[in-house]
């Protein structure tokens, strides 16, 4: 599909209306940025509302967001580069690269005294398991066992970006099932161990520079900080409240699972690379055969399941396309049947905790990103706006109203 072939005017009219309506709704969002791209370039960019709750400065398309788990695909890309170079074997024990992964135990519950009951895992963790969320790690906001470790045993949150935050037990033997969690933070540590560099330096040299991503990093530059969006919390009765928030700016661990800040425009460049078989705007990032390998289902009989909101302030119960089968590639969710939005079977996508959502449709050569900064995850106003945005793109693509 060429840039001229995309029905940009029809989609822009619909998308502008969706952004305005999502801000004006009650409850709505205070501000949003959304963009869509095809293989040739960005075909829509829009912003509505304000950058910070209660302030007059408008939301703009160059606003900087805490990207949360949309970081994961960038880490996955860095790992795939090492696979291409023969430096990383996805099916070798990950402890061969990062010995501390060999010391992680499985938690089987808690004793009468409340102490965790631990045992050795039955098999080694591999990097493929880390990339597919089958290694056994979880998150405290999606898993009651981890939430108890935090509440009763002082297990630090991953938001602290500390080594202690990563030192959680496995919830099950590696490979046994799919459980969304800190797996790709660990994968980032594997990348660092192989390259001998910090993850941000790896990203900058091997991904951001070839893609022209100048506004994405683990730490905010002065210019980025001046454009950063404010975080908000959805109150039980519906309205939003400003929420002081900033990820650690000099983190002990640059967290490959959630630690990046960036703009939606930069992420469009990343999505286009995946649409264009690994070719970036200033150089190749991945080989075409690597892209084709990564977009396939890499689960071994496991299924992607609903994310239960264990900590209500951070997440509601959340699931993309309930009732539809979903699998996992390297490192995206794959919808295995056509979605109600019009997204075809086999497309890629995922999200970030503060209600950021993206998808990559290699079949049609389109993708998009919707960004807000609202907790908890699965916010009906933001998520509903995103689904309307994606639906409008496919209606325009197929000549609908």
Image: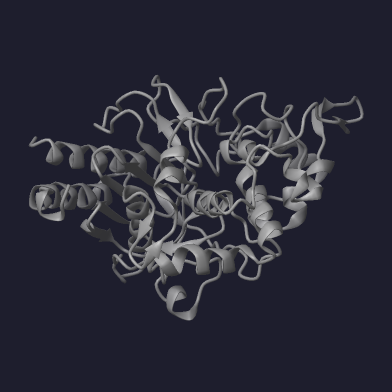
Relative vertical location of residue 277 with respect to residue 192 in this rendering, above or below: above
**Residue 399 percent across, percent down from the top left:** 8, 37
Q: Residue at x 76, y 51 (%)?
A: 98
Residue 161 shown left or right of residue 95 in the figure: left
Q: Nearer the viewer, residue 384 or 52?
A: 384
Q: Nearer the viewer, residue 277 or 201?
A: 277
Residue 356 shown left or right of residue 139 in the figure: left
Which scheme is used to colour this image of the protein? one colour
Q: Is residue 224 visible?
A: yes
Q: Residue at x 41, y 39 (%)?
A: 292
Residue 3 shown left or right of residue 89 in the figure: left
Relative vertical location of residue 302 with respect to residue 99 in this rendering, above or below: above
Q: Residue furthest right?
A: 113
Q: Nearer the viewer, residue 125 or 320?
A: 125
**Residue 115 percent across, percent down from the top left:** 88, 33
Q: Residue furthest bottom?
A: 222
Q: Residue furthest front?
A: 86
**Residue 319 percent across, percent down from the top left:** 45, 30
Q: Is residue 167 visible?
A: no
Q: Residue at x 43, y 79 (%)?
A: 223
Relative vertical location of residue 24 with respect to residue 108 in this rendering, above or below: below
**Residue 38 percent across, percent down from the top left:** 23, 51
Q: From the image, which quarter does the C terminus lie in?
A: top left
Q: Quadrant of residue 390?
A: top left
Q: Nearer the viewer, residue 336 or 215?
A: 336
Residue 126 shown left or right of residue 358 in the figure: right
Give the total of numbered labels.
0
């Amino acid at each position: 599909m060429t840039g001229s072939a995309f029905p940009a005017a029809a989609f822009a009219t619909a998308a502008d209306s969706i952004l305005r309506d999502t801000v004006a709704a009650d409850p709505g969002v205070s501000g949003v940025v959304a963009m869509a791209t095809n293989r040739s370039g960005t075909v829509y960019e829009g912003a509505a509302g304000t950058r910070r709750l209660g302030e007059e400065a408008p939301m703009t398309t160059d606003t900087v967001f805490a990207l949360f788990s949309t970081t994961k695909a960038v880490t996955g890309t860095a790992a795939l580069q090492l696979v291409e170079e023969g430096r990383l074997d996805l099916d070798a024990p990950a402890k061969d690269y990062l010995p501390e992964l060999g010391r992680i135990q499985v938690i089987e519950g808690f004793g009468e005294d409340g102490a965790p009951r631990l045992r050795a895992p039955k098999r080694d963790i591999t990097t493929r398991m880390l990339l597919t969320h089958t290694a056994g790690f979880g998150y405290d906001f999606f898993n009651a066992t981890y939430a108890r470790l935090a509440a009763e045993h002082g297990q630090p949150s991953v938001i602290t970006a500390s080594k202690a935050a990563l030192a959680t037990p496995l919830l099950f033997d590696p490979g046994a099932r799919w459980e969304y969690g800190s797996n790709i933070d660990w994968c980032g540590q594997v990348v660092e161990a192989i390259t001998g560099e910090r993850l941000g330096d790896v990203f900058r040299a091997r991904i951001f520079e070839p893609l022209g991503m100048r506004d994405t990093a683990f730490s905010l530059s002065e210019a980025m900080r001046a454009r950063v969006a404010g975080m908000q919390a959805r109150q039980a009765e519906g309205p939003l409240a400003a929420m002081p928030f900033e990820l650690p700016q000099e983190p002990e661990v640059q967290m490959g699972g959630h630690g990046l800040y960036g703009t939606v425009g930069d992420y469009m460049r990343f999505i286009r690379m995946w649409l264009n078989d690994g070719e970036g705007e200033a150089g190749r990032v991945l080989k075409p055969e690597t892209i084709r390998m990564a977009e396939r289902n890499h689960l071994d009989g496991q299924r992607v399941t609903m994310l239960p909101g264990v900590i209500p302030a951070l997440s509601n119960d959340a699931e993309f396309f309930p009732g539809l089968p979903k699998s996992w590639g390297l490192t995206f969710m794959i919808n295995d049947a056509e979605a109600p939005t019009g997204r075809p079977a086999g497309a890629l996508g995922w999200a970030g905790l503060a209600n950021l959502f993206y998808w990559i449709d290699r079949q049609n050569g389109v993708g998009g990103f919707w960004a807000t900064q609202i907790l908890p995850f699965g916010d009906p106003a933001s998520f509903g706006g995103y689904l309307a945005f994606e639906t409008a793109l496919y209606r325009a693509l197929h000549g609908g109203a």
